[in-house]
Image (cartoon, rainbow, N blue to C red):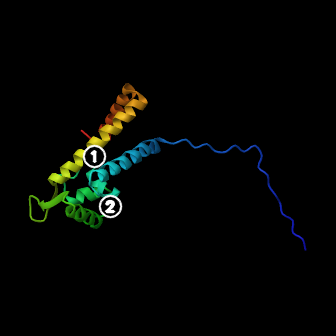
Amino acid sequence: MSTTRKTTRVRNVKPLVITPMIGSLLRLPHEVMVGRMLESLQAHGFQVTMTELRVFLFPGPDGLRPAELSRRCDMTRQAMNYVLASLERQDLIERRDGADVATRVVHLTARGWRLIEQIRECVATVEGEWAALLGKERFEELRQTLHELSKQLGKVN
């Protein structure tokens, strides 16, 4: 017995070209920035993971409750408590009692503030590099546009 196979040829099919949409265009530079922050922090003696770094991203954890940080970092409260315990062991934060006994609040230690300073120094360096690539005027337009969008979305004042 022989079997015959039918072969279907698709003619004149052009490959689909996918261009990045705005979500990707925002994410890709962010990934570069986060990678540079981690490298810079590690070079300056801060051995934080990417998950731990998320706690320190703008506007930072100082004065916030762990539950708020867990929402901001999109993780469970249990996972955030694990992350905060690690940051406490590294002397970057401390959890203190809040206004009432049931409330705990995260505060940066002196070492935690130095970590924030290092992050900001790194970001300023990267921004300078990007301004050189795009030109200062275009880079400033980009910054202003993103700031305006962030304000409209209720993410910054």
Quarter of image, res 96: bottom left
As drawn, which residue projects farthest toward the right?
1
Q: Quadrant of the N terminus?
A: bottom right
| Residue 130: % across, % down | 39, 35
Disc number placed over residue 75 in the picture, else none: 2
How far apart, in angstroms, are the residues tagged by discs 1 and 2? 22 Å
Q: In this view of the protein, which residue sits in the foreground, 34 or 153? A: 34
| Residue 42: % across, % down | 31, 53
Vertical comparison of 21 with 87: above or below: above
Residue 152: in sight, yes or no? Answer: no
Q: Secondary structure at mark 1?
A: helix
Quarter of image, res 26: top left
Residue type at mark 2: give it. Answer: Met
Q: In this view of the protein, which residue sits in the foreground, 69 or 111? A: 111
| Residue 46: % across, % down | 27, 55
Q: In this view of the protein, which residue sits in the foreground, 28 or 48? A: 48
Residue that mark 1 sits on: 119
As drawn, which residue projects farthest toward the bottom?
1
Q: Is residue 12 left or right of residue 43?
A: right
Q: Residues within 10 Å of mark 1 (few under 14, many from 20)?
A: many
Q: Is label 1 or label 2 in front?
A: 1
| Residue 80: % across, % down | 27, 63
Q: Residue at x 38, y 49 (%)?
A: 35
